[in-house]
Amino acid sequence: MTLAGRRWGTCSPVSTTLAHTGIRPTTVTRRAEIFGDAVAVVQADLASELQLADIAARIATSSRQLQRVYAEIGGTTFRQHRAGLRLDRASALLREGLSVSDASARVGYRHPAHFSAAFRERYGVVPSLYRTAA
C-alpha cells in the first residue's frame, strides 16, 4: 500500500546515505515508502490522537519498524513529526484569520495554552501576534 511513498523515492539525501551504509537499495526504497505512507496518514488526520501503533496498523507494518523508519528516513521521531505538521497547519489557519482557539482545536490541541507554548517554541512568537502580523 503506497499512498505517498513514491514521492520520497530513493534519491533523498537520507536514503542515499543509508544505501552507502550497506543497507540494500530495496530496503531503503521500502522504508522510504513506509515513511511516505505514514506521512500521508498523519497529514490526513492531524486533529486525532493517532499514536505510532495506530499508524503502523493502518500501513501494515510494526510499531518498531515505523519507529526505525522515522529515525532513518525522516530524521525525527513520530511525535516530533506529528507536532511539526500540526503547528505548520495551525500557522496556515492563523494566516487565514482563524482564532487561536479554533486553529489549535482544528489541529488536535485540547488546550490552547499547550498550543501557544508549542507554537512559541517553534516560531518564536505567540500565536496571537503571529495571527495579527499575517
Image (tube, helix red, strand yellow):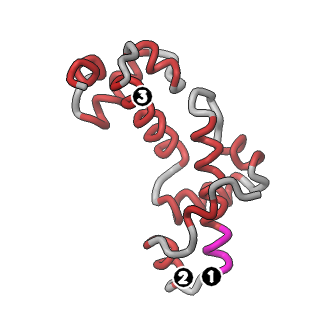
Residue picked out by circle 2? 19
Q: Are marks 2 and 1 in contact (CB under 8 Å)?
A: yes
Amino acid type for the residue under numbered disc 2: Ala
Q: Is residue 64 magenta?
A: no
In the image, residue 126 lies at what x, y percent? 26, 23
The rendered magenta stretch, by its main secondary structure, is classed as helix
Span of residues in magenta: 25-30
Between 23 and 87, which is closer to the camera in this rendering?
87
Of labels 2 and 1, earlier in sequence is 2
Which residue does the image show at 74% across and 51% down from the upper left? Answer: 59
Quadrant containing the N terminus is bottom right
Of labels 3 and 2, earlier in sequence is 2
Amino acid type for the residue under numbered disc 3: Ala
Amino acid type for the residue under numbered disc 1: Pro
Residue picked out by circle 1? 25
Which residue does the image show at 67% across and 56% down from the upper left? Answer: 64
